Image: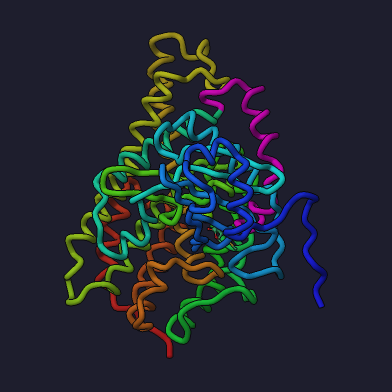
Amino acid sequence: MTAPLQVPPGYRAHDPESLRGYLAEISAVRDRLGGDPAAWTIEEFGDGNLNLVFKVRGPEMGVAVKQALPYLRLVGEGWPLPLERAHFEHMALSHEARHAPGLVPEIYHYDETLALIAMELLEPHIIMRHGMIAGTVYPRFADDLSTFAANTLFFTSDLALKAAEKKAMVGAFAGNTELCKITEDLIFTEPYMVAERNRWTAPYLDPLAAAIREDGDLKVAISRLKVKFMCDAEAMLHGDLHTGSVMLTPEETRVIDPEFAFMGPMGFDTGAVIANLLIAYFSQVGYESAPGGRDAYRAWVLRATADFWNGFRAKFKKLWEENGTGDAYPAPLFASEVGQKRLAAEREAYLDRLFADTLGFAAAKMIRRILGLAHNIDLEKIADEKVRATAEARCLRLARDMMVNTGAYTSIEAVCGQAERLNGWEPKLGG
Ligand code: SR1
Ligand code: MG
């Protein structure tokens, strides 16, 4: 028998009824919901891997309540997980709200003991993955996400902060070790070895999974990325910036769920966005009623991918030009006319390096969603396993090339062009 999970005094996982009593005592929530608490409707609707999420509605408005469980919801009590992740999420949401106003949900209440955050209920927003499976175009997405990424990454980096401020942030997020460890294991390690938690569309992908486990160049490349993830405290990352962490409508975008936040390499966040768009791109074959039926949507996905990166790059550069008040690149070293030119060239070089990191991390995230523990519904919902495996094999081939031949991709358009070519490739599947 496994021992019962240890939780701190005062913690209990809420159910809808106990939550009703709790929220009735919290004026910041009660007053927003309005009316008699007995008449509020409360439903648990979390479909993520980790937490409880409740939708609470009163006569005045609705509120979302997210509570961390002491274990991983996806797996159960056999995988304990620290409740402190709610603390890191709350801290990250506060920074994000300051740097990217209007792009994260408003927080109404935070309870450290209960690991519970009550926040704005996003309606009629939906999780982006669901929208992409349905073939919905989101005209605001690329502009909003590139603003979110550029602002949150730039303003928490040494380019904007004084060294002491930046080091204080490194200290504040240093304790989110167990969520980082999930990433270190599930993204940077297990897909490249035999691991109990791995799964893939067998038998079709058996030969590809085996080839990846034998691929020395790929193992070196993923290990370099892992070191970067573990050592490069460049900026505050969202840490899990996939299309399941974006809720939106065609008019409005919000980024949710930064519980994996920590001070890490910027390319991990930008790479996550690009990886998930490319996964959505390849998965479209599973949702078209006739061949080519989703071509227009595919074209939009690739445009959004390019617009995201190009928008990010332009916005990040502008922020640096206008707000480069941090201790990195000290102004006195570049004060002369020649110095200004050198700094302008160095900004481009910095962003080129960030682009290469972005592609490496994007590739890592594409591979983990196909060979590791946690998959994406974009691919998982494709009922015909052979069609799914074909989409996954195309995705794996692009990812492998992005990670090992990163330097060959000098623009995001080159990545999109390669995705288009590979979408016509018929892989040799196992089985
Ligand atoms: C075991 S948790 C699996 C994944 O869910 C989260 O969204 C993160 O991406 C994590 O790696
Ligand atoms: Mg999440």
Q: In percent of the image, x 39 and y 52: which residue is there?
A: 274
Q: Is residue 171 magenta?
A: yes
Q: Which of 262 and 39 is in front in this view?
A: 39
In the displayed structure image, the side of residue 243 where residue 298 appears, left or right:
left
Q: Which of 166 and 19 is in front in this view?
A: 19
- The answer to whether residue 163 is above or below residue 30 is above
Q: In percent of the image, x 31 and y 59: which residue is there?
A: 131
Q: Which of 122 and 291 is in front in this view?
A: 122
Q: Quadrant of residue 49?
A: bottom right
Q: Quadrant of residue 70?
A: bottom right
Q: In percent of the image, x 73 and y 52: which residue is there?
A: 11
In the displayed structure image, the side of residue 182 where residue 411 appears, left or right:
left
**Is any atom of residue 228 visible in this view?**
no
Q: What stretch is highlighted in magenta?
A: 158-183
- The answer to whether residue 183 is above or below residue 342 is below
On the image, the x and y values in percent for residue 89 come to 59, 44
Q: Quadrant of the N terminus?
A: bottom right
Q: Quadrant of the C terminus?
A: bottom left
On the image, the x and y values in percent for residue 389 come to 38, 78
